[in-house]
Amino acid sequence: MAEDKGTNVIKWDNAGTDDILWEYDKEYIRTASVLVVNDWQWAAFVRDGQIIAVFESGKHTITTANIPVLSKIYEKVLGYKESVFKAKVIFVSKKQFMGKWGVRAMCKVAEDYQAPIPLMANGEYQYRVNDAALFITQIVGGMKSYSSGEVTNFMKSYINEQITQNLSQQYYMDIYTGLEKASMTTKVSIEEDFRNRGVELLALKINGVQTEEKYQEDIYKFQQFRSGSGRDWKQFGVMEHMADAIGESSGGAAIGTGMLLFPQMYQQLNQQQQQQMANQMQQQGADAQHPKIMCPYCGGVNDYPYKFCKECGKPAPSAQPQPSSTTVPVIGADTTSAKNGKRFNNCPYCGEDISALPKTPKFCPYCSQQLQ
């Protein structure tokens, strides 16, 4: 090696904003060289892949006093008047580094909706090295070179990988509806892995999440169905489709479908409404000696029997000719009017409340009499 005509001072100046480390460009270190370490740096001596010394901030003279192992590795190299030793000097920054991340992963929608969907998320992070020896050993040591650019790119990839793995284990709806909580959950879950590599994860923020457009409608529907009112809305939607199907059908299949399915769903959805109706009847003085009946047109409460509704003035079904059917009506109505497309709150034949149905079906779901 040619004689080194440069200085014996080893230091890292002019560090860039994103520079996380820097390697001293001389392979042989002279005895009594001066090592200058700034407040925001560490300096590590590495030989044969092993760290032989780490220096904190200050001005240090390299001797066997501060690096005892030097007494064993001094060499006489052509061109140097002093004793030298071969080692790498790596400076590591203590500064905080910030960056942006973006990942794509697969996760499940929610605990009660286990379908997998793609998740696209982005955000910001902040970290710093808190253990130079561990950082060099666990992260830098496996690289072919010690360039700051390569280390920075590796850290970005490492952060993305950790976030991807963690988000894939969370539920999309939990992340979507609680970005702050999801950010903290993700940070707490992965910061131990960073700590084991000499890095402190200072902050992690999820700025936004989304999924592919074709899944967004399903997510919207799921949000509607998830609440109690959403479940009611869903059931009403099912009932509306069933009413359409029954209204467009004829014969025993339509009647059977209505009688089998509508009562079960209707009773679940309208228990509160039925209770309110019962209370209303009681308030009107209904009992075993004074029975009451509701008008099939307006729902008004009348004494039973009655000729004209006291609320809307329409004639009582009992005053009209009864249909030829084995069904004995409790409350009736003009079946001719019914078949002409009238809207009923109660079945004119069996008296059951059908006001909660989206529209009057072709056949009563309780007694199977034709209504339209």
Image: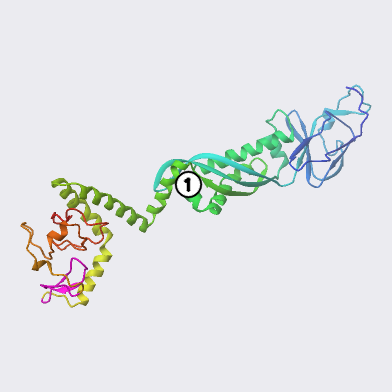
Name the residue rendered at 9%, 65% in the picture. 320
Q: Position of residue 349 (x, y in %)?
A: 12, 61
Query: Is residue 221 in view from this perspective?
Result: yes
Is 308 inside the magenta-drawn segment? Answer: yes
Query: Is residue 349 in view from this perspective?
Result: no
Name the residue rendered at 20%, 66% in the picture. 297
Q: Quadrant of residue 148?
A: top right
**Predominant SS of the magenta segment:** loop
Q: Viewed as shown, does residue 327 lie left or right of 101?
A: left
Task: Look at the image and give the residue range highlighted in magenta.
Answer: 289-310
294 or 88: nearer the viewer: 294
Is 221 inside the magenta-drawn segment? Answer: no
Question: 246 above or below 273?
Answer: above
Name the residue rendered at 72%, 39% in the picture. 133
126 or 101: nearer the viewer: 101
Q: Quadrant of residue 366?
A: bottom left
Q: Viewed as shown, does residue 159 lie left or right of 284?
A: right
The residue carrying pointer 1 sits among few (fewer than 14), some (14 to 19) or many (20 or more) residues within 10 Å by Cα, namely many
Question: 274 above or below 172?
Answer: below
